[in-house]
Image (cartoon, rainbow, N blue to C red):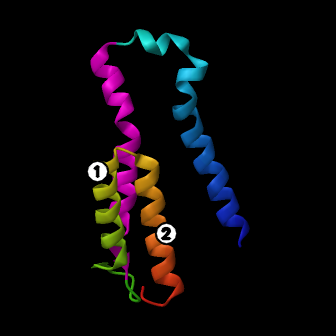
Amino acid sequence: MSVELVLLAVLMAAVTYPSRAVPLLAPWIERLPHRALVYLRLVGPAVLAALAAVNVMVVSADGRPAFHVGVEWLAVVASIGLMAWRRNLFLGLVAAVVLVAVARATGLA
């Protein structure tokens, strides 16, 4: 593992933690209008969707973006299906991660 990846992880934590800690650090957040609270509640799933979409575009050997359809698509569909069926975000995310990890470990992806 390179030091650059550790620095990137620290930077990502520094950016994401404050947004998740706002309700703890600012108790007045509960007094926001209902529309604002709904918006803030949907930021997390929107970020997860954006992260999933990143796996759709990959950089090829010559550095040009290329459209990619692989096991990641199956994991996203399985995750969305489980989340809709069980109403459990954690279960859907775990299923997607396990599906991709098993596919990569067995050489299918």
Quadrant, the C terminus: bottom left
Q: Residue at left 44%, top 53%?
A: 91
- Alpha-carbon span between mark 2 and mark 1: 18 Å
Quadrant of res 61 = bottom left
Q: Which mark is residue 7?
A: none
Residue 55, position as x, y percentages in the image = 37, 69
- The crowd level at tag 2 (other Cα within 10 Å; few <14, some 14-19, many 20+) is few
| Element type where label 1 sits in the image | helix
Tell which of 55 and 82 is nearer to you: 82
Q: Residue at left 57%, top 29%?
A: 21
Residue 52, position as x, y percentages in the image = 37, 61
Q: Residue 82 lies in magenta, yes or no? A: no
Q: Residue at left 34%, top 48%?
A: 86
In the displayed structure, 63 sits above or below 18; it is below
Residue 13, position as x, y percentages in the image = 61, 46
Quadrant of res 33 = top left
Q: Which residues are drawn in magenta? A: 33-59
Q: Pointer 2: what residue?
A: 98
Q: Which mark is first along the chain, 1 or 2?
A: 1
Quadrant of res 32 = top left
| Element type where label 2 sits in the image | helix
Q: Pointer 1: what residue?
A: 85
| Label pair 2/1, CB-CB below 8 angstroms | no
Residue 36, position as x, y percentages in the image = 32, 21
* Residue type beneath disc 1: Trp
Q: Residue at left 54%, top 84%?
A: 105
Of tags 2 and 1, which is closer to the observer? 1
* Residue type beneath disc 2: Val
Q: Is residue 70 visible?
A: yes
In the displayed structure, 49 sits above or below 77; it is above
